[in-house]
Image (cartoon, helix red, strand yellow):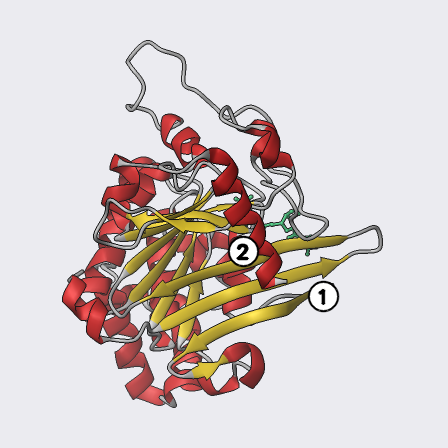
Amino acid sequence: MSETQRVTDAPLLSVRDLRTVFHTEREDIHAVDGVSFDIYEGESVGLVGESGSGKSVTARSILGLVDEPGHIEGGEIMFRGDNLVEDGWDAHRGDIAIVFQDPSNALNPVYTVGNQIREALSIHQGLSGSEAREEAVNLLETVGIPDADRRVDEYPHELSGGMQQRAVIAIALACDPDVLVCDEPTTALDVTIQAQILDLLDDLRREEGLALLFITHDMGVIEEATDRVNVIYAGEVVEHASTETLFENPKHPYTQALLESIPGRTDPGQELPTIPGEVPTPTAPATDCRFAPRCPKAFDACTQVHPEPVDIEETETEHEAACLLYPDDRPREEVVERHQSKTEDDR
Ligand SMILES: Nc1ncnc2c1ncn2[C@@H]1O[C@H](COP(=O)(O)OP(=O)(O)OP(=O)(O)O)[C@@H](O)[C@H]1O
Ligand code: NI
């Protein structure tokens, strides 16, 4: 991704201070609690964090698919100049498509693959009859399904897992999207097939200019498949940077811990570190650092002050971390005070 393009163009999708809350009988769950990020045309952006950190709810929010008892209660989702939170998704149906983890769930077992692609083509592109069939075959070819002219008439169970996920991607492409949200798109597949699907998505990005939002708990997938990355913890983005910078110079202790959990980054023979404890369920607006109870670097203030995103100076590309350790060239008391007054200003 060229930096010059980024300076001149506006983001294709801009999420600002997104808040999605589930009002359950017992409690309010602030699943997405002030998430912001941008995606530019033809760019691959990652959203990474452990299970329960709010990745899928962020994805569903962007697509306007949050179900009761969940609601988007704040923030903006700007897409091509429209705020989807205010204006609704109708004018942009299909412009943002999603691919889920398990292709066998995403496909309808009683219809042929071709039928399912044609349905999307009819809804989103107004195609029917032989025209739609031809386009369905084209799309299967685009996603690398061999013998597409025959396979278009097959049922999902006749395809392997990898071919099923390709078919799911073909259905998503039938909506003619600008952004493809991929929620753990390769987690259910074995490693060689995983790599092939990542290659396919990268081809689509480069050749069709498709923007990708990659949602995963797997730092290996992030390293392989994204240009920029947002690290999410308990509903908040705690660090974002270019993928290269994040791997070379992670600043947030949570990012550092996630990176230490990748195989290969630890010395061979050494036990793989996992982060002790679990992601907390956010049941109230944050008044502290939600990672503090698990953080090896936490100090007193971390349980009393909410960390705000801070610019990390050394890099040219944007790099921010929300942690009371930063900026790290100032006396700690002054730094904590700055975070505190910024939180108060925002309220
Ligand atoms: N329908 C729902 N009702 C109540 N709470 C929900 C609902 N859906 C999600 N949540 C809560 O929202 C939080 C974020 O969940 P989310 O599914 O976004 O996590 P995730 O990062 O996608 O995790 P995973 O990697 O396991 O898919 C969790 O605390 C979860 O319990
Ligand atoms: Ni999820």
Number of numbered callouts drawn? 2
Identity of the amino acid at label 1?
Glu
Tag 2 residue: 342
At which x and y percent is residue 121? 38, 81
Identity of the amino acid at label 2?
Lys
| Furthest residue toward top | 269
For the C terminus, which image quadrant? bottom right
Say left or right for 126 vs 83.
Answer: left
Q: Classify 10 Å Cα crowding around label 2: few (below 14), some (14-19), many (20 and above).
A: some
Residue 68: image tag? 1
| Furthest residue toward right | 25
At which x and y percent is residue 240? 37, 50
Earlier along the polypeptide chain: callout 1 or callout 2?
A: 1
Q: Residue at x 64, y 35 (%)?
A: 303
User: Of residues 104 and 184, which is closer to you in this image?
Assistant: 184
Mark 1 CB within 8 Å of ligand 1: no
Q: Check disc 2 and report its element: helix, strand or loop.
A: helix
Mark 2 CB within 8 Å of ligand 1: no
